[in-house]
Amino acid sequence: MKSRWQKFISFEWLTIYRAGLLVAALAIGIMLLGYGFVHADEPFDLRAFIEELYANIASELFGIAITILIIDTIYRRYDERAEKRRERQQLRNQLGSGINEVAIRAAEELRASGWLTDGTLQGEDLRVANLEKAKLWQADLQGVNFQWAKLQGANLNDAVLAGANFTQANLTATRLRGADMRGALCTGAKMYRAHLVAAFLQDAKLTNAHLEGAKLTGAHLEGADLTGAHLDALTILPDGTPWTESTDLTRFTNSGHPDYFQPEVLISSEHDVGDE
């Protein structure tokens, strides 16, 4: 263990508070000594002492006050930002909850704070999250991992879902009108009766996805992989016709097909993207 002398010479005892007291004591000592040297032949006169020093002391105190206010403002802003970061992270964690009420409330609070649409949630891990009937319209969820997540009846109209992973996710009756799902991985996803009108599904992996009853009117499927996908007579194709066993899906996925169907880009209205 270090001796007291070793601790003293190593300045381990010198905290910021103690340093402040030391400097203040040193300043007072210098003022008294200076006054004593200048007025060595005169008795100490408090009034004269104050008259000589008040201007300097006032300006110094004013400078100190400004410095304190600036430092306090900086620390307040730092604390506010730190609190915002903690709140944001807490809501991100809650959004991935397996308890539907918790996840729904987190989505509402994230939207109120603007974090649902500003890219905060890009790449988030929301595996097994219970987001059934969540209001996620226009959310920026690019690259989010939704593996095994529950999204039945959720509103994802006009959401950014490019590169998202929906492997084995439940998207039954989910609203995805105008959603950007380019390059999304939807292997084995349950998309029964999903509303995919005008959705952007270019290069999406829909292998073994369940699209029975899904509405794909105006959807963009160029480059999409529909190998093993499940469709039925209630599945509406991009050209508005129902799927049949004789349907050639490559006319929607292969732009080089002689009868390739190119959907028009539809602009969703406020009513379409809203949470009704």
Image (tube, rainbow, N blue to C red):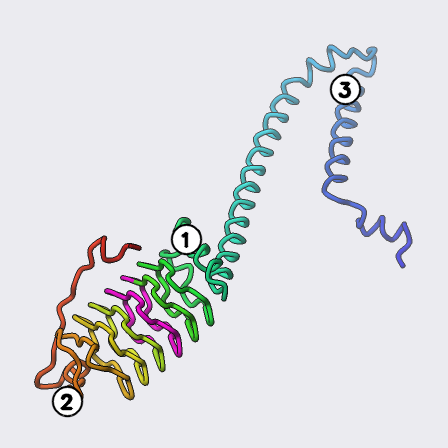
Q: Quadrant of the N terminus?
A: bottom right
Q: Are dots 3 and 2 in contact, CB under 8 Å?
A: no
Mark 1 vs mark 3, foreground winner is: 1
At which x and y percent is residue 166? 38, 75
At which x and y percent is residue 249? 18, 84
Q: Are dots 2 and 1 in contact, CB under 8 Å?
A: no
> Image height check: is 76 above or below 108?
above
> Image height check: is 135 above or below 29?
below
> Image height check: is 260 above or below 1?
below
Q: Quadrant of the C terminus?
A: bottom left
Front residue of 254/178: it is: 178
The residue to which callout 2 is attached is: 246
Q: Secondary structure at mark 2?
A: loop
The residue to which callout 3 is attached is: 35
Nearest to N terminus: mark 3 or mark 2: 3
Residue that appears at 80% across and 19% down:
36
Q: Is residue 223 left or right of residue 115?
A: left
- Three-letter residue code for mark 2: Ser
Q: State the CA–CA distance, disc 1 to disc 3.
A: 68 Å
